[in-house]
Amino acid sequence: MSSSDPTLMEQVVNLCKRRGFVFPSAEIYGGFRSTYDYGPLGVLMLRNVKEAWWRAMVQLRDDVVGIDAAILSSPRIWEASGHLENFTDPLVDCKKCKERFREDQLDDPTTCPSCGGTGTFTEARAFNLMFKTYVGPVEDSANVAYLRPETAQGMFVNFMQVLQTSRKKPPFGIAQMGKSFRNEITPGNFVFRTREFEQMEMEFFVPPDEGAKWFEYWCDERMRWYQDLGMPADMLRLRHHEAEELSHYSAGTADVEFLYPWGWGELEGIANRTDFDLNAHAAASGERLEYFDQAAGERYVPHVIEPAAGATRTMMAFLIAAYAEDEVGGEKRSVLRLHHRLAPYKVAVLPLSKKDTLTPVAREVLSLLQPHWMCDYDETQSIGRRYRRQDEIGTPFCVTVDFESLEDRAVTIRDRDSLEQVRVPIDSLVDELRGRLTA
Ligand code: ATP
């Protein structure tokens, strides 16, 4: 399905709800302001997105280590990072209909898109996006804390601890995945923009004169990551920010953009943040946040290249890119052509009929596969309908157990994309599937 098809987004959102990827949160209470819950398939897929990121960014490298920092931490972090002062969006209220908007997102800043009123907006005021709360039982200003609006600061404030304990030296990176919170004025477009979301960020610390080189490197790496996981090249682009768009500390920023059904939009930001963050935390904390290069006998504050992606937004982009409709044997099917690493289930075990005689072998096959992969098991309805169900949730392989299996101890593997079916002995099933699931 083309990404400009006007019904694409609706199809994806419906599929997510119908099949248990993503539900509107608290639906029994009428929902809750653009928040979403991840259902049985969504939780698997989101884990797979994060796992694929961790694999590429940490597991397959020897120059990046991970951390998992606290969501609630010292408010001094946000003072030093500039978030308390600057992490704001320009908020305008329509005096007529009382709706609120982000001024920088209005097509026409003089006209209210909700009621059509012109000249009805208040002056824009800076609205801080951080969620504020109180730590401990007393709600006073001494106990204010914030839910982190990004994971990145965790890497800066733990820089020295990681440097000392991991024995890494620049160029090296610290990666983290986890929840972030922003009190967005206008959340929307499904999970594209929500107030609670997950990020996958990495801070790569480099010698000061190597910033430009590593910025280029990470732009290439990150573009490749999406494509290696099956994202079509024509739905991705790298957009370099113009000089006037750059934050004051940035020596270069590029967005990995995806062609959403409503147009190009950010998927990930890659920034050359120079030594801004380490210097800011060093000044505010009084601690030295530097690297001492013993060989050269010099001390320096590393520069930082930051690829910052959203896990939930990325999962949605993969769903949009993978959604397709085609015909099999004259019958329409919808299919998620997800890369096997991202698919919620890798394999579905389907006994041809519900007859008791097939159940023991089918269960045996399931137990054989479960230690290796997330598997589904389904014995209700016709085999054709069950194939369609698995296609629709992106399961790359179905394994069918039929009456012959009782005789020949073999089963049929069916491929979601080529529809090819091959018969393999149960004894070699794990090897056979492993060969297909490691690419
Ligand atoms: P945007 O311009 O879309 O608000 P941003 O430039 O503020 O995003 P960053 O601070 O660079 O975003 O965050 C890195 C990534 O985190 C984004 O590219 C996006 O994938 C994700 N992200 C940011 N805000 C949200 C949100 N409210 N909901 C879902 N994902 C988000």
Image (tube, rainbow, N blue to C red):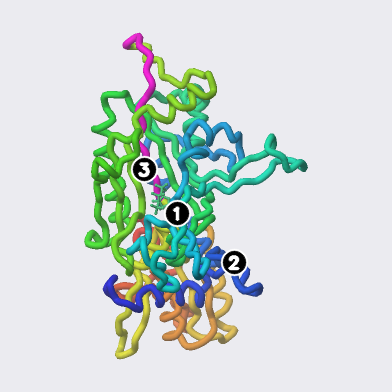
Outermost residue toward the bottom? 330
Q: Amino acid at mark 3?
A: Pro
Three-letter code for the amino acid on which mark 1 is drawn: Glu
Secondary element under disc 3, as helix, strand or loop, is strand
Question: Residue 338: image x %, image y %?
Answer: 36, 65
Identity, as a three-letter code, of the amino acid under mark 2: Phe
**Could you tell me how far apart the alpha carbons at marks 3 and 1 are, in whole angstroms?**
35 Å
Crowding around mark 3 (Cα neighbors within 10 Å: few <14, some 14 to 19, many 20+) is: many
- Quickly name the residue at label 2: 32
Q: Which residue is mark 3?
A: 307
**Number of numbered labels in the structure image:** 3
Q: Which mark is residue 27?
A: none
Label 1 neighbour load within 10 Å: few <14, some 14-19, many 20+? few
Q: Which type of secondary structure does the marked residue at label 2 adopt?
A: loop
Residue 264 is a magenta residue: no
Residue 180, given in percent of the width and then of the height, sits at 52, 49
Instruction: For label 2, count other residues whose C-alpha is less than 10 Å away and answer few (under 14), some (14-19) or many (20+).
Output: few
* Earlier residue among tags 3 and 1: 1
Name the quarter where the C terminus is drawn: bottom left
Quadrant hosting residue 27: bottom right
Q: Which residues are magenta?
A: 296-309
Give the label on residue 123, or none. Answer: 1
Which is more N-terminal, label 3 or label 2?
2
Q: Could one spot residue 75 in this view of the protein?
A: yes
Q: As drawn, is 363 to the left or to the right of 123?
A: right
Q: CA distance from mark 2 to mark 3?
A: 31 Å
The answer to which of 10 and 138 lies nearer the viewer is 138
Q: Is residue 393 left or right of residue 265?
A: right
Q: Position of residue 132 (x, y in %)?
A: 61, 46
Q: Residue 236 versus residue 48: which sits nearer the camera?
A: 236
